[in-house]
Amino acid sequence: MNDDDLSDSEILELHFGTSSPCWRLGSDSNALELAAVRGLANIGVALDPEQVAGIRGLTGVTSTVELDISLFGRQLKLHLVGRKLDMLSWAGTASAYTDTRAVARDLAHGLAFAELVVSEVNSLVVVLDSNGIIQRFNRLCEEVLGKREEDVIGRSAYELFMTPDQAARSSKNITGFFENDKPFDVERYINTVNGPRLYQFRNKFVQSGSGVEQRFLICSGVDITEERKAQQRLTELANTDTLTGLPNRHAITELIRTALETATHEASHQVGVLFLDLDNFKRVNDHYGHIAGDGLLTKVAAIVSACLAPGATLARLGGDEFVVLSRHASVESLEGTARTIIERLSAAVRLDELVELYTSCSIGIALYPQHGNTVETLIRNADTAMYAAKEAGKHTYRVFAQEMNQKVARAMWLDINLRKALEEGQFVLHYQPLVDTATDAVRSVEALVRWQSPEQGIVGPGEFIRHAEESGLIGPIGRWVMSEAAKQATIWKDKGLNLRVGINVSALQLADANFAAHFREISACFGSEASLLDIELTESCLVENQDRVLRLMRQLREMGSKIYLDDFGTGYSSLAQLARLPLDVIKLDRSFVSGIDGDASAQELVRSVAALAGALGFSVVAEGVETKQQDAFIRQVGIECAQGYIHAKPMPAHDLEAWLLKRKKLRLIA
């Protein structure tokens, strides 16, 4: 039979052994490959660019392309049924245009695959028309929602799965979405067989492929309940203090920022911030342990929360620092809150049946817009005011004032430059003599540290010692003073000057477990069997860890040191209480001495102290003797030594030596 007498289907059958050969088009060629078996190319047919573009327009969904080709000298009109396989190829089956049964078969096969995917995909798939009527309901929908597809097809999704309010909103929304014809996402709680679950639906519009021209909404949903719970938990962790359950630094910062944004639109609106810091919290941790410290922080959080007005927010910044945000504040209301908090915290805090603690706090107050118009400025200024409250004696509050920033700037300068001073050797010692009131001989000298700042010249200890204690620099500064004083005392001893040197020691230095070892090491370093250094302590050194301090005082005396009680009269001790302490000398504070000029009561007080000290076996030194009348009086009442400007100001070692030599010459002349 002549090929011209054969149909297109018969031509395919003749040359390929099948009326539906496989076809393939690659991305690197415009030749259509035809073969009886997929993967084996029997023949290639050149296509024009338009035909190639039509085939490469196929997606992953099975579809058809009509194609006119020349095959074995015969013009054939084909239906290509197929889809895109991957990034590089498109493939399927070819049938004669007139072979509708083969085309239908191939399409049915492809659509069956697509139907299987829709049915078995691990997502809820629901197809709705513009009225919300269900057109398709896949297998996962049946399992999750407990309804069969045949029971819901043709019924309203609004009535089946939504409350009347939800249905009204969804119906309105979907109508608008159909009009806009744009895909959209939505999250919705669905009542499943396992209870309410949160699903995220990705919704897209499609056009019907045959019959009446109609658009449908394909809703594909995945369960995101656990994902959202995890995100919520992460958000809570990122914004919550795990110890107290309060908002943390990040959370309160955002809350204050929001409050400030609201306040900018209301002229009379004021936002207040209270910055709280517990007083002496470190001692609780050190003495009772961190578990007790954490317990105290939790109790404090509850106590402070109970003090706040409705709408105020308490947060923990970290450590023992808390912040209160008041969204509608005034100076008066913030001060009232601060007073209430301080009063409540003055009562004992019971941690358990055995442990009861006392605490207190210092509070700084800052107000928007007077004290700052940004979150950072407001918190910083409240923090600054809190430090002012601590400087005022703790257990109180202060409202921010601009001059406080000068103190902060000064503190920052000290923090930076004190460290440089240690590294670069900018400290020097000046010495002030203690004069025997009976013989006018110099018994000893007190070493007083001075800071030779390249920027500010000589800086006295009153300006930097407190900061050194707060910053932890008092330890290395104290060790330098100890070493330098011991070195100078040894030099004077070698020169034949019998001068003991007294050094001031703070409570923080005594708290150092290695203090005695450092002292012994320095004494040995300068070749002295008995120490040439005396120790001057204040009453504050005796307040805490008294047993340990007493042992240390005895150790120092065993090493040859005398123990002076400095600034007596400024603390709370009485002479009777001091009788049991291993002291050698009491230094009467300058405030006693300055009042004896013409003041009978002050004179009687000094006279009584001198008499009682003598009876208890203590020597007495009068500090701050500046006038002849004061000097005469302390000699009269039997005080052994005087120290003050009437005799000599503090001076460098070489100046002291010159002063001693000059004084010796004057006494010889006299």
Image (spheres, rainbow, N blue to C red):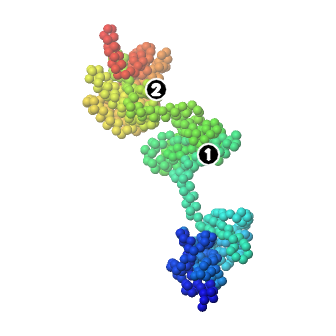
Q: Is residue 450 visible?
A: yes
Say which residue label 1 marks: 257
Secondary structure beneath dot 1 equals helix
> What is the quadrant of the N terminus in the image?
bottom right
Q: Amino acid at mark 2?
A: Gln
Of 418 and 3, which appears nearest the observer? 3
Residue type, mark 1 in image: Arg
Would residue 633 be found to the left or right of residue 131 on screen? left
Vertical side of 239 occupied by 89: above or below? below
Specify few, some or many for label 1: CA neighbours under 10 Å numbering under 14, 14-19, or 20 or more: some
Q: Residues within 10 Å of mark 2 (few under 14, many from 20)?
A: few
> Mark 2 to mark 1: distance in Å?
40 Å
**Tag of residue 456:** 2
Residue 425 locus on image (x, y percent): 38, 30
What residue do we see at 57% from left, 87% from top? 14
The residue sitting at 44% across, 15% down in the picture is 627
Q: Secondary structure at mark 2?
A: loop
In x, y percent, where is residue 653? 35, 22
Q: Are marks 2 and 1 in contact (CB under 8 Å)?
A: no
Q: Which mark is residue 50?
A: none
- Which residue is at the front of the view, 477 or 666? 477
- Is 151 displayed left or right of 551 in the figure? right
Left/right of residue 29 with respect to residue 486 in the rendered view: right
Q: Residue at x 27, y 21 (%)?
A: 495
**Quarter of the figure with residue 507:** top left
- Nearer to us in this view, 504 or 220: 220
Residue under the point 33% across and 11% down: 666
